[in-house]
Image (tube, rainbow, N blue to C red):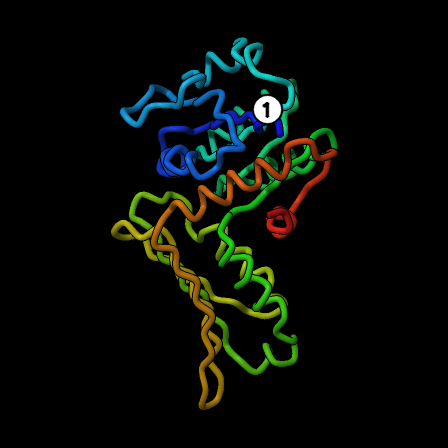
């Protein structure tokens, strides 16, 4: 089987380092380029090139195969610049950046008409299971509870509420859903849906203690996209492949 060639955009951030740390678990992946302002001490495997964003946008793409899958784990501003490039030079995309505006979300959806795209604010298997649980709660039952979402992330996370909390809230609509954001410590991610009713409380909790959970999801999604026709795919679809 031909390895899936990967371009990692945002390679020196928390998620970028986590993706590189999980590469040995995915022998079917070939990391071809790391894109960041400067390299770090974690390094890249043999055959992988470091590029700055300017290098990539100015012509570094010429060294990349046409079937290269882009994993974007940058910040919102970096995603905006990356989309400028992808609209000129379409490549399959795993988009995991949170805090994007409506305009960027629409651009990602439009790109999916040309190449395969996975857009997921949370790439963990557990979150997919939790989302399915929330989706299955009948509307009539939800109406009997007050709903609060509490999300806790590390102190350096810039967007609040988190993309996952917003996605959970959307699953629980219609109805009022209060979101409470905590930014402290080094927490990778905790999401808690609290349903408080008359004399009873129900909670759905998803806790991530290791950022490698998200990294594995990104690499699994990239392998899934390789060779797929254009379209906007869900994380659940990527899990259908062993």
* Direction from residue 33 to residue 226 in the image, left or right: right
Identify which residue is drawn at 57% across, 29% down: 4
Q: Say left or right for 160 vs 119.
A: left
> What is the x, y in percent for residue 135?
62, 66
The one nearer the camera, 37 or 224, is: 224
Q: Where is residue 234 in the image (x, y as percent from the top left)?
A: 64, 48
Could you say which quadrant of the image residue 105 lies in? top right
Identified at 52% across, 55% down, the residue is 166
Q: Please name the residue shown 46% across and 14% down the image.
A: 54
Image: 154 above or below 131:
above
Percent x, y for residue 185?
Answer: 25, 51
* Quadrant of residue 167 within the rendered picture: bottom right
Q: Kindly give the residue lying farthest to the bottom in the view shown.
A: 199
Q: Residue at x 35, y 50 (%)?
A: 210
Can you say whether 68 is above or below 155 in the image? above
Q: Is residue 99 left or right of residue 15?
A: right
Quadrant that contains the N terminus? top right
Residue that numbered label 1 is attached to: 68
Q: In this view, does 146 lie above or below 199?
A: above
Q: What element carries label 1?
A: loop
């Amino acid at each position: 089987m031909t390895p899936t060639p990967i371009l990692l955009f945002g390679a020196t951030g928390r998620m970028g380092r986590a993706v590189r740390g999980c590469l040995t678990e995915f022998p079917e992946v070939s990391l071809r380029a790391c894109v960041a302002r400067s390299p770090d001490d974690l390094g890249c495997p043999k055959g992988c090139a470091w590029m700055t964003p300017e290098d990539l946008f100015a012509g570094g793409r010429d060294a990349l195969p046409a079937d290269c899958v882009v994993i974007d784990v940058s910040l919102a501003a970096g995603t905006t610049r990356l989309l400028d490039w992808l609209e000129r030079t379409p490549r399959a995309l795993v988009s995991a950046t949170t805090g994007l505006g409506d305009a960027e979300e629409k651009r990602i959806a439009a790109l999916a008409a040309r190449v395969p795209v996975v857009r997921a604010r949370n790439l963990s298997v557990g979150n997919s299971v939790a989302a399915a649980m929330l989706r299955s709660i009948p509307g009539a039952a939800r109406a009997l509870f007050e709903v609060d979402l509490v999300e806790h992330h590390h102190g350096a996370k810039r967007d609040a509420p988190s993309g996952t909390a917003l996605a959970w809230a959307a699953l629980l609509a219609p109805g009022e859903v209060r979101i409470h954001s905590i930014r402290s410590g080094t927490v990778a991610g905790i999401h808690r849906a609290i349903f408080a009713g008359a004399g009873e409380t129900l909670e759905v909790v998803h806790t991530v203690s290791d950022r490698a959970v998200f990294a594995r999801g990104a690499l699994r999604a990239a392998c899934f996209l390789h060779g797929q026709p254009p379209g906007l795919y869900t994380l659940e679809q990527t899990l259908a492949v062993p």
